[in-house]
Image (cartoon, helix red, strand yellow):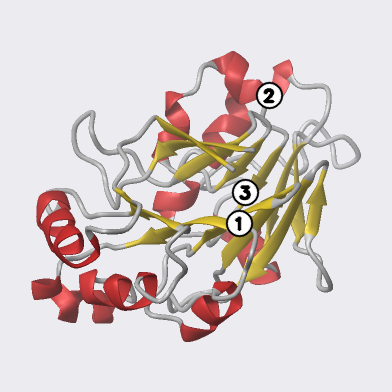
Amino acid sequence: MINLQLLGCSGGIGGPAHRTTCYVLDEHILIDAGTGLGELSLEELARIDHVVLTHAHLDHVACLPLMADSVAEMRSTALQVWALPDVIDILKTHIFNDQVWPDFTKIPNAHHPFVTLHPLPENGPLMLGPWQITALPALHGIAGCGYRVQKESVALAFSGDTADCPAFWEKIAHDQMLAAVIVECSYPRRLADMAQLSRHLQVDDVIKRVSQLPEKVAAIVVHRKPGLETEIEQELRAALGGRDLRLPQHGQIYKLS
């Protein structure tokens, strides 16, 4: 059984309904650290031991430095951040640089920092207790990836932010453990040009790819741009209405087996 809490699953901000990408796995692991992370209490934030990032765009990392500052004195061990090597370099250069934000990888000292930054393993999955986390391909114009997350005999796939990426779908097409794919859909079909320009998915991309997955695989559609949610939902349901199609709001919890 996987407990997945979607603290943030919107493609932007605006009012109480919109929080950007942040998912919790069993209280201790985050996938991304967007503005949805701000929904947790201090005590809940302090229980997070690992943050696994898809990429370094602000809507996916905005609350990472804030969390590090808020709970540093409440933790006895460093918060561990995992990502592709190029993403780690971006964090070092542009966020934890003593200009945009204090360098918590050296505070209080380099031997015992509040935050440690780790590249994903080159060979094989990242092993965090019972969790196996494997990077999957993505196409977003910068260093980034999706993930396959497995606990025991259940797996989830996260597309991350991406244009249509055949390699991602090939990796999960025959995955017998796959219970759900958490896939972005930023735009309705009338804004397909904007999706292509920004390297995001639009409705027809998602319809094409999800319809090729086994019926048992739930499609959890996230990263819908604020104000476009109803249009996206109507178009998806018209084409995929017979599937397990979920369009979550922030705070929603799924138990997947």
- Are circles 1 and 2 on residues that touch, CB within 8 Å? no
Q: Which mark is residue 91?
A: 1
Q: Which residue is mark 2?
A: 47
Task: Please state, as top left, top right, bottom left or bottom right, where the C terminus lies in the image.
Answer: top right
Q: Is residue 201 visible?
A: no
First in sequence: mark 1 vs mark 2: 2
- Are circles 1 and 3 on residues that touch, CB within 8 Å? yes
Relative depth, front residue between 148 and 43:
148
Q: Amino acid at mark 1?
A: Leu
In what element is the residue under mark 2?
A: loop
In what element is the residue under mark 3?
A: loop
Q: Which residue is mark 3?
A: 96
Task: Please state, as top left, top right, bottom left or bottom right, where the N terminus lies in the image.
Answer: top right
In what element is the residue under mark 1?
A: helix
Q: Residue at x 45, y 81 (%)?
A: 165
- Which of discs 2 and 3 lies nearer the camera? The answer is 2
Most distant residue in the right direction:
111
Q: Is residue 99 above or below residue 42?
A: below
Real-space Cα separation, disc 2 to disc 3, in angstroms: 22 Å
Real-space Cα separation, disc 1 to disc 2, in angstroms: 22 Å
Residue 89, image x and y in percent?
66, 65
